[in-house]
Amino acid sequence: MIEQFHLLILGIVLFGVGLYALLGKRNLIKILMGIEIMTIAVNVVFIALGANIANATFTRFAQIFPLISIAIGAAVLAVGLAIAINNYRHAHSVDTDEMATLKR
Amino acid sequence: MSLVIIYIFMILAILAAIFALECRRLMFSIIGLIAMNLFLWVLLLTLNAMFLAWIQLIVYGGGFTALFVVVVALTEKQRDESFDWKRSVIALVIVAILMGIAIWGVIDSDLSITFGTSTIGESLRALWTERLTDLILQAVVFFATSIGIGSLFIHHKKKHKEETKA
C-alpha cells in the first residue's frame, strides 16, 4: 500500500531538483531541463491528489490539469530552445551570462 | 504494486533527474531525462492514470527529447563546462530550505490515504498479466531512443575527430 504523502514528497523532491537547475546552472539547455522536471513534478502532485478517491471519475478529472500543463510546457520548451539556438548564433555559447548579446 | 517497487521507481526517478542535470555530456543528460520519464510513466500507471501516462510518455519521452537532441546537435556544445561552485552551493541551500518547509508541511497535514495492492508477488503477477504489452512497448521505445541518441553522439564524435585531424 502506498501513502498519498509519499507521492507528494516525490513531487516536492523533483520540484527541488528542477529548482536547483534553475538557480544553480548557467547552461540554458540544463535550465530548460530543470523547468521540464518542475512541470513533471507538479503533474505528479496533481495525480497524487486526484488518485485518493476509489471512484475513477475524480482521477479522470485530475488528469485534465496535467494535460494543460504539458501543453503549456511544450510551448515554453519550444520558445526556450529557439532562444537558446538564437543565443548560440549570436554569442557561440548557450551560457545565460552571454545572453546580453541578443539585445544588440 | 507493492510499496517496495513503487519506492524503487521513485528513487530511480529522482536519481535519473539528478543525473540529467549533473551529467557533463548533454546527450547523456537527455538519456537521463528519458529514463526519468519512463520511471514516472510506471508510477502513473500504478496510480491508474493511464491516459496521462501515455500522453506524458509520448510528449515528454518523444517530442521533448527530439527537441533537446536537435538543439544539442545544432549548438554543437556537447559538454557543459560552466560549473560554478559558489552558485551551486547557494542554490542547494535555498532549495534545501524550501524543500524542508514543504516536506514538513506535507507530513504535518496528516495525509494517510492508501492505494495499491499489498504484496510484491501480487504486484509482479499483476504487472506480468495486465501490463506486459505496455512493458514491451516501453522497452522498445527506450532502446530505440537510446540507440538513436547514441548513434548521433558517435557520429558527432567521429566528425569532431576528423575535423581536429584536418
Image (spheres, helix red, strand yellow):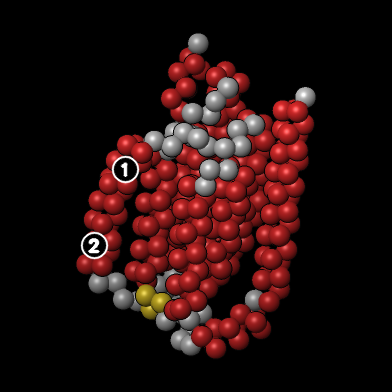
In this rendering, the answer to whether B123 lies above or below B101 is below
Work out whether mark 2 precedes mark 1 in sequence or the reverse, and give the earlier one: 1
Q: Which mark is residue B89?
A: 1
Figure label count: 2
The answer to which of B132 and B94 lies nearer the viewer is B94
Amino acid type, label 2: Trp
2 and 1 marks in contact (CB < 8 Å): no
Locate residue B52, reporting x and y percent: 56, 61
Q: Quadrant of residue B126?
A: bottom right
Q: Image quarter for residue B140?
A: bottom right
- Outermost residue, top side: A104
Badge number at residue B104 = 2
Q: What element carries label 1?
A: helix
As helix, strand or loop, the secondary structure at mark 2 comes to helix
Residue at 75%, 28% (x, y): give it: B165
Q: Mark 1 lies on which chain?
A: B
Rendered residue at 50%/76% (across/down): B5
